[in-house]
């Protein structure tokens, strides 16, 4: 239920065809330091796609997905940036000559406190929307090519088919949580429909098959809570942010953004709540397809949970909308930023404004408060 135009294309790619080696190399980007200073500062320089930021547990780097290929096969790789941006330290990517006959995609991804790496991997025949292989893998960050396949998608859970995952997190070194999604493929990447199913849990030690968290049906995002065994999540068409204790099932509303619009991509650190609210998001309910939320991004709001005071974060010098903010241990915020193109159109004596959201994202960084 989180299909920005860029994420639609990625999800169609990210779901999928020939086996190749996956070296963990250290090919850097050419540029050093943030591309633009300030807060937010642009911290990636890729002319293609940079998405899905995730902080390393100690805040020493940002794990993310980027489009690496100089040709149009839409490959996606994993990379690690320094905490302030700049030269990419490492990458998990296929560099073999034979990989150009297929599309490979890594992400979402997350690293546990013990150094375990979880990531989604997919392969498809070149530019084919429907994937051939989709896997959730677990490895060590030091040796990501030595992986274990946790499960392969599509997968039936409680009578519902999961065909994609998003918002992957480690609850502990043996437990994972993610947003389970269903994907309806079409001939066009842009028209592929992604719906949130529910928040899913996996216990790698006892039963490595996902189970749904009760009460999270139609979830659009999930993140870790401010205490062990808690999650933060949002629902389709809903202005509220929820907190759930997994052990007891107790659920509370952390904040209601009300007339500001639909909330999603919520994250919490102490009394600080960040969420994308309103913007370019629509919610519909179809008797057959169910709840569908189309999301191209929006502004980020910060809330002081102690006082309920709301503050819209600045966009910077260029008009932007945002997706997927993540907070570092020190309070810095990495986020996807999508530029806006605003055109004034005059027809006769009538003036209207047309706004287009870019399908290409860069990563930006807000300084710690």
Image (cartoon, helix red, strand yellow):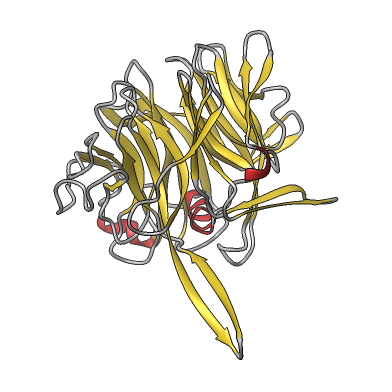
Outermost residue on the right side: it is 287
In the rendering, at what x and y percent does residue 266 appear? 53, 33
Give the quarter of the image for residue 56.
top left
Camera-nearest residue between 171 and 39: 39
In the rendering, at what x and y percent does residue 77 appear? 34, 47
Q: How many marks?
A: 0
Side (left or right) of 18 relative to 134: left
Camera-nearest residue between 320 and 219: 320
Give the quarter of the image for residue 269.
top left
Q: Residue drawn 37% across and 66% down?
A: 72
In the rendering, at what x and y percent does residue 234 appear? 63, 34
In the rendering, at what x and y percent does residue 311 appear? 48, 37
Residue 153 in view, yes or no: no
Side (left or right) of 307 relative to 66: right
Outermost residue on the bottom side: it is 348
Camera-nearest residue between 324 and 317: 317
Q: Quadrant of the C terminus?
A: top left
Q: Quadrant of the N terminus?
A: top right
Q: Residue drawn 62% across and 58% down?
A: 192
């Amino acid at each position: 239920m989180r299909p920005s135009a860029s994420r639609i294309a990625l999800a169609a790619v990210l779901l999928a065809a020939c086996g190749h080696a996956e070296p963990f190399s250290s090919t850097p980007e050419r540029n050093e330091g943030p591309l633009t200073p300030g807060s937010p500062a642009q911290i990636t320089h890729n002319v293609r796609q940079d998405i899905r930021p995730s902080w390393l547990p100690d805040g020493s780097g940002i794990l993310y997905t980027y489009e690496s290929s100089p040709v149009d096969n839409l490959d996606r790789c994993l990379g690690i940036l320094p905490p302030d941006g700049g030269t990419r330290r490492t990458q998990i990517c296929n560099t073999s000559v034979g990989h150009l006959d297929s599309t490979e995609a890594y992400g979402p991804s997350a690293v546990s406190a013990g150094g375990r790496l979880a990531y989604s991997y997919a392969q498809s025949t070149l530019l084919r929307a429907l994937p051939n292989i989709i896997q959730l893998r677990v490895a060590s960050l030091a040796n990501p090519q030595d992986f274990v396949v946790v499960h392969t998608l599509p997968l039936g859970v409680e009578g519902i088919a999961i065909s994609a995952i998003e918002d992957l997190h480690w609850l502990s070194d043996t437990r994972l949580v993610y947003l389970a999604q269903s994907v309806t493929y079409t001939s066009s990447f842009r028209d592929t429909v992604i719906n949130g199913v529910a928040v899913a849990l996996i216990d790698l030690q006892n039963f490595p098959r996902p189970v749904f968290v009760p009460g999270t049906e139609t979830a659009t995002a999930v993140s870790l809570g401010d205490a062990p065994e808690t999650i933060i999540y949002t629902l389709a068409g809903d202005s509220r942010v929820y907190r759930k204790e997994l052990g007891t099932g107790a659920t509370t509303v952390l904040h209601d953004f009300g007339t500001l619009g639909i909330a999603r991509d919520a994250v919490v650190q102490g009394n600080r709540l960040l969420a994308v609210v309103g913007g370019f998001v629509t919610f519909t309910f179809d008797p057959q397809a169910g709840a569908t939320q189309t999301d191209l991004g929006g502004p980020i709001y910060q809330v002081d949970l102690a006082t309920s005071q709301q503050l819209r974060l600045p966009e910077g010098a260029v008009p932007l909308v945002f997706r997927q903010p993540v907070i570092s241990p020190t309070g810095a915020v990495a986020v996807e930023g999508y530029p806006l193109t605003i055109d004034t159109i005059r027809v006769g004596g009538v003036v209207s404004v047309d706004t287009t959201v870019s399908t290409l994202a860069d990563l930006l960084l807000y300084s710690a408060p």
